[in-house]
Amino acid sequence: MLPGFNTNITYKNTKYHIQTEDGGVKNPVIVTFLYSEGEIIASKKTSYAHLTGEADYRERVKKFMSDQHRSVIKNLLAGEYSEGKKPRGMEETVTVREPSRTESRDITFLIEKAKQVRIEILKMLTEAGSGHTGGSLSACDIVTALYFSKMRHKPYNPTWRERDRFILSKGHAAPLLYAALALTGYFDSAILKTLRKIGSPLQGHPCSRTLPGVEISTGSLGQGLSVSNGIALGLKMDNLNSRVYCLLGDGEIQEGQVWEAAMTAAHYKLDNLCAIVDLNGLQIDGPVERVKAIEPVASKWSAFGWHVIEIDGHDIEAILNALDEAETIKSKPAVIIAHTIKGKGVSFFEGKVEYHGIAPTREELEKALRELEGDG
Amino acid sequence: MGERSQEKEQKKKAIATRDAYGEALLELGKKRSDIVVLDADLSGSTKTGKFANVFPERFYNVGIAEQDLIGTAGGLALTGKLPFASTFAIFETGRAWEQIRQTICYSNLNVKLVASHGGVSVGEDGASHQAIEDIALMRVLPNMTVIVPSDGNETKQVINAIAEYRGPVYVRLGRAKVPSVMPDEYKFKIGKAYIFHMGRDVNIVAIGIMVSVALEASKTLAKEGIDAGVINMSTVKPLDGNTLLASAKACKLIVTAEEHSIIGGLGSAVCEFLSENFPIPVRRIGLKDIFGCSGTPEELFKLYGLTEEDIVKTVKEALTQ
């Protein structure tokens, strides 16, 4: 653990204290707290997990600390934390990702990961011979951004108390969840080919009793948001800062329970909860708007007391920005309406309702892999 | 104590099982900080309101939204809390059945479902509010334990016992006051039936309010020279097969008594067990595939054949056949 920095400053007749600490090798983060009259009014936390393996890491971390300490002082003197401006809270959280060693904002890296996740989804579905292709691919970039960047989680310790939680309410996108879990190190990727086979922990729809990393069994639509609310309430009771992410399908929000839960989340001001609606526009029987219209989706959530963010659900940077924005919202839950394309990433699956619930054939897989790997 | 003064004593201790629940929950809340309670706008009737008044920070009212009630309770259990989720029996087990199946039982979450207003003793509110299918609905679910306490004393013990047990539990409580039937020294254990006495002619296996009715019937039958035993099968699932087997071997007839449909409840559970292990004549007292209606509990018990006289008549008819 490296020695910290402490500075006292008087700015506009108010005394401030700035303190920067090193979490040490076991908790490789640098935290800076800005105190005013004994209370923390802002903080900044940065992970340096990616540096710990480096030979000159002590020098680099020292510089890192000094830079972060000075940046908070600079912001203070620039009036960032003055009265009239809301305290910014956790101004920047670079997540501690273990064991992956990526920069959370490394978009190129995340795009590459999303591609790998898609490849695993297609391979396991082909192997299984059945399953939900379209909705796994449409939410792929969102789930990649969560698992490889935004979420704080420890794949080697799936029940880590302080982890962020991900609830796949649209349980039929199980292949997507399984690929994300395998590629972040929850289990050996070799297990993916057992999907839907007798005795496999990879059930047709996620089962929490058989697979570590699955928080709750889902598959019957409309139930995940209520469970997410319960988790969010429990985390608040325990004063944990962990966040809950709940992925819903757009057809799924036709379920009444979703709106019961939406009311509950707003009533209990669950600002540690972020729902994401994968708005791919298609459900089994056809276009959602034709089967039973759900639009206007954004104003529905807004009317239910949620902070609404609308994005292109395939733009990794937009997804990360939206997840960050959601984290800044206080006293209400946030929902990200992600406009997506069903079957995204494989041209001949895109926008095709018939690929909601069928797996690719061997030929389709080969063609799809060529396309994804850029040789097609 | 003479019989009459004993009866007086029992009447004095008469308390609705839902009231006993409210008291037990409050006491449990004082002892354990992990207890959280959820209700769906019926906390006054289910008596969870007592807990809510003392521990508002551990009480969540989700409004009139039973499906959400179950999911939220499940989520709280996932963070290590011990949730008690309450509402009326038919709304909890009927309206939210699939949520209980999918979220609670399939994932085997440590959630306690404690519902009031089981059976026709609900009275005037009528069929819409009288659960006569709840035991069947809960019994069919893998991982679920089903308990129907018979009086206030037993209810309090049940609540404490299920708090110590890990896994989903359904407890059915009643709206109406019930006489105290269990002896003071009684110790409830999940899966263990209580034998009041083992009969040589017939054994009446009863649950809930019907235990007190069965005890009355047993007295009447004794006067007529029929030795009728009474067994409180408060845990309907897992059924106490050993006690049931012993009681069947000891007599000529088993009668089941419950304030529930004769399809799928205690009567079915007993028949399933006996037909495989020790086939013997069985008669089922309960609602005979019919909905309840409005009326006083006493009137409804008469209408649906749930009285002491009905049990006596059923026993006598069956024994002469």
Image (cartoon, coloured by chain):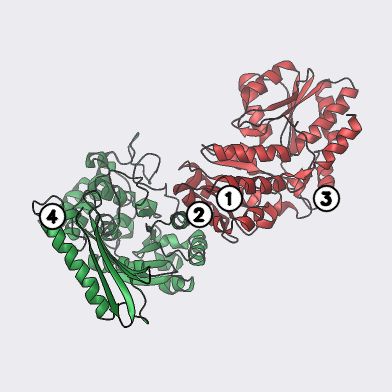
Chain colours: A green, B red
Q: What residue sits 43% from the left and 66% below the top?
A: A333
Asked which secondary structure carries label 4, the reply is: helix
Asked whether B288 or B242 is in front, the reply is B242
Query: Mark 3 sits on what residue?
Result: B296
Chain at numbered mark 3: B
What separation in Å lies between label 3 and label 1 (alpha carbons)? 28 Å
At a point 87% along the width and 23% down the height, the residue shown is B222
In terms of sequence position, does the residue under pointer 2 or pointer 3 come before the other?
2
Q: Mark 3 packing: few (<14 Cα in 10 Å), some, or many (20+)?
A: some
Residue on which the image places disc 2:
B72
Residue holding disc 1 = B85
Lower sequence index among marks 1 and 2: 2
Give the label on residue A245, or none: none
Residue identifier under label 4: A58
Where is residue B96 drawn, in percent x and y? 56, 51
Identified at 48% across, 43% down, the residue is B109
Name the mark nearer the viewer: 2 or 3.
2
Give the distance between the C-alpha atoms of the residues marked 1 and 2, in whole angstroms. Answer: 9 Å
Pair 3/1: label in front:
1
Determine if residue B12 is in view.
Answer: yes
Q: Mark 2 and mark 1 in contact (Cβ < 8 Å)?
A: yes
Q: Amino acid at mark 4?
A: Arg
Give whichever of discs 3 and 1 has the lower sequence position: 1
Report whether mark 4 lies on the same chain as mark 2.
Answer: no
**Same chain assignment for discs 1 and 4:** no
Q: Nearer the viewer, residue A359 or A267?
A: A267
Left or right of B41 on screen, residue A119? left
Q: Is residue B162 above or below residue B67?
A: above
- Amino acid tagged 1: Ala
Residue B149 visible in image: no
SS at badge 3: loop
Callouts 3 and 1 on one subunit: yes
